[in-house]
Image (spheres, rainbow, N blue to C red):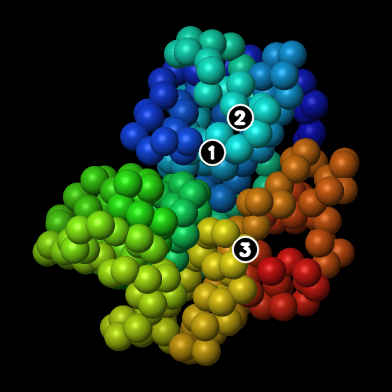
Amino acid sequence: MKVDFLPVPARVEAIERAVPDNHLFYFRPETPMAVEPGQFVELSLPGVGAFPGSAAAYPSSTEFQACIRRAGRVTSALYRLEEGAPVGMRGPFGNGFDLEAFAGRDVLLVAGGLGMAPLRALLQALLDRKKDFGEIILLYGSRDPAALLFREELESLARRGQIRLRFSVDFVTDLPWSSEGFFCKVGLVTGLLEDLRFAPGRTTAAVCGPPALYSCVLEELASLGIDPGRIYATLERRMKCGVGQCCHCVVGGRFVCRDGPVFSLAELRSMEGAI
């Protein structure tokens, strides 16, 4: 892999502020850069610092979307920028999701919180080639209804029969909602697997969310009958420099930035400390 340490000049094209502290940023690089689902780039702010950001949309070589949580000094500085502000982009990095692993099979996506962002890119890629895949089921859990990312977009897909959708929230003041094609429960996202009708033997799964989600849902999917080699998780919270130079991403003898961040459960089982 060719490694270029010089950031490509880019600009903040637009900002969607639908969810507090989880804004969707649109970046436009001066040099075309297509970032596949599951891959990431290093975003740099001149004079401030850099951080990794996953693709939140199916690739366009002229635009990169990332849903970024305000969680530290650099991301807080990004939140103070206006549209048109200059930034830098390096990448793309990582292996991303192999779409051929999903071809001809049903797809089960399980997302928690901000983990919906990289799975949105995968979902868009699957829908772009819908005839190549079977039924797509999305289980998505978040803290409360206001924290659900891309809620209207996902509900629209469910109403049109593009996906089968289940939400879960930890807290809610009103009764959970439901409509044709989707519904919401109160509880953990793993509870959405209860009474879920699907065919594990012909299903490929992808999971993204907080570490606690991985520790419970990955093996549960395997126990339901999905082949561990067809259960994928992205360890995006371990992404660091992108090229394996800082070694901060190493877990179980693997470089998450370089060898991942997408791994199958079969691989993760041999990577001590990964989940």
Say which quarter of the image contains residue 1: top right
Number of marks in the rendered image:
3
Disc 1 + disc 2, Cβ < 8 Å: yes
Q: Say left or right for 260 vs 142.
A: right
Q: Quadrant of residue 203?
A: bottom left
Q: Which mark is residue 75?
A: 2
Instruction: Rate crowding at label 1 as few (under 14), some (14 to 19) or many (20 or more) other CA atoms within 10 Å.
Output: some
Q: Which residue is mark 3?
A: 211
Q: Residue at x 29, y 48 (%)?
A: 151
Q: Is residue 69 above or below residue 202?
A: above
Instruction: Find the residue positioned furthest to the left.
Output: 180
Q: Position of residue 14 (x, y in %)?
A: 41, 20
Picture quarter with the C terminus? bottom right
Between residue 165 and residue 8, name the one nearer to us: 165
Image point 54% across, 11% down: which residue?
A: 85
In the rendered image, which residue does mark 1 sit on? Answer: 69
Residue 265 vertical placement versus 82 (above, below)? below
Q: Is residue 32 visible?
A: no
User: Mark 3 falls on what kind of element?
Assistant: helix
Q: Earlier in the sequence, mark 1 or mark 2?
A: 1
The residue nearer to you, when weighing 204 against 17, is: 17
Residue 57 in the image, given as x and y percentages of width and height = 43, 40
| Amino acid bearing label 1 | Arg
Measuring 52% from the left and 89% from the top, which residue is drawn there? Answer: 223
Q: CA distance from mark 3 to mark 2?
A: 21 Å
- For the residues marked 1 and 3, what is the alpha-carbon distance in whole angstroms? 16 Å
